[in-house]
């Protein structure tokens, strides 16, 4: 058996993620009165259709006027204000347009453009200042995301390295659950293997010998089988993702073991035949 690990990193580590762009734009448009349309554009894409990261309202039209302002901001790396522009079908409406660059690591990673109801120069400047102050939040969110990705990548690499250094799969499983329980502040982590008929618990965090006859082990295996039978991860107490799932085995596990919550996750591995290892994270 051979295992290959590939780590891919974006060309720009400070790229603006779409989910951050959407959340940030929503808050900005709520804070500014009279916003007609808003959008955030990436500064990295050459494809016009791929430049749109977020729009407000989310189901609103992609007005080409917003993209034109964004291009102007990208070229100048400075904020842009346009007053008294006509928009809409037949140019029946009048608006102001304000574009502001979004920086991370001293690079323009995006542009926010707001189409707003007409107002004075002083009021336009106040809106622009609000966007500029908000852009500091964008940069901090990107920095936090990069820090998390680096920490997670380091942890994942360490986890794989430790597992591959063990003499047997049972020893590897034991090291994995111990590392998970210590790093994610769990009370217990367990891992089981599906052998085609039932699930066998093969590793329990910080437990050297597992007695399959104990009620605790049987309850853990029952929770794993409950997840496997429904081909779905299960979280108990139930969240919205559990709405149509049976969770009786997980409820029984919590009732007898005294934990606050349990999560079972299916891990599919494809070799010459299919096996489905599962882990019960408590």
Image (tube, helix red, strand yellow):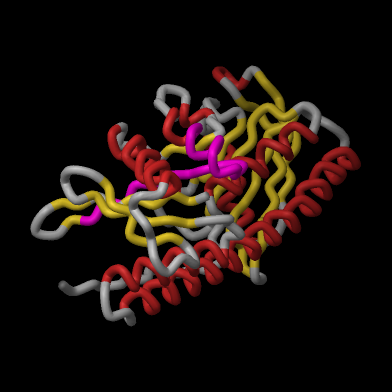
In the picture as drawn, the residue positioned furthest to the right comes out as 122
Which residue is nearer to you in this view: 179 or 187? Answer: 187
In this orientation, does residue 129 appear? yes
Residue sitting at x 38%, y 68%: 8
Q: Is residue 55 left or right of residue 178?
A: right
Which quadrant is home to the N terminus? bottom left
Residue sitting at x 59%, y 39%: 66
The residue stretch that appears in magenta: 251-269
Which residue is nearer to you in this view: 278 or 137? Answer: 278
Residue sitting at x 75%, y 32%: 30
User: How far across and how far down the image is residue 279, in percent?
Assistant: 39, 52
Which residue is nearer to you in this view: 118 or 100? Answer: 100
User: How far across and how far down the image is residue 25, in percent?
Assistant: 66, 41
The image quadrant that residue 105 belongs to is bottom right
255 drawn magenta: yes
Question: Where is 55 relative to 16, above or below?
Answer: above
In the picture as drawn, the residue positioned furthest to the front comes out as 213
Residue sitting at x 44%, y 29%: 247
57 drawn magenta: no
Question: Where is 99 relative to 183, above or below?
Answer: above
User: How far across and how far down the image is residue 274, in percent?
Assistant: 15, 51
């Amino acid at each position: 058996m051979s295992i290959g690990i590939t780590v891919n990193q974006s060309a720009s580590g400070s790229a603006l993620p779409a989910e951050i762009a959407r959340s940030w734009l929503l808050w900005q448009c709520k804070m500014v009165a009279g916003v007609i349309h808003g959008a955030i554009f990436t500064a990295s894409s050459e494809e016009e259709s791929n430049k749109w990261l977020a729009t407000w309202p989310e189901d609103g039209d992609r007005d080409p006027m917003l993209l034109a302002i964004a291009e102007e901001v990208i070229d100048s790396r400075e904020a842009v204000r346009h007053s008294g522009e006509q928009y809409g079908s037949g140019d029946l409406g009048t608006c102001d347009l304000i574009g502001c660059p979004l920086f991370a690591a001293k690079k323009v990673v995006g542009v926010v453009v707001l189409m707003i109801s007409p107002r004075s120069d002083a009021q336009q400047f106040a809106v622009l200042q609000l966007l500029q102050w908000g852009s500091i939040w964008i940069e901090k969110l990107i920095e936090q995301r990069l820090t998390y990705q680096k920490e997670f990548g380091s942890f994942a690499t360490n986890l794989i390295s430790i597992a591959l250094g063990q003499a047997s799969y049972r020893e590897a499983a034991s090291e994995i659950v111990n590392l998970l329980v210590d790093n994610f502040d769990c009370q217990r982590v367990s891992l089981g293997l599906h052998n085609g008929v039932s699930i066998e618990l093969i590793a329990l965090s910080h437990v050297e010998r597992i007695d399959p006859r104990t009620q605790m082990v049987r309850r853990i295996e029952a929770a794993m089988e409950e997840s496997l039978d429904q081909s779905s991860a299960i979280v108990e107490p139930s969240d919205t993702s559990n709405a149509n799932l049976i969770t009786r085995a997980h409820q029984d596990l919590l009732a007898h073991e005294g934990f606050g919550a349990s999560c079972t996750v299916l891990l599919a591995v494809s070799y010459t035949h299919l096996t489905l290892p599962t882990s019960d994270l408590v």
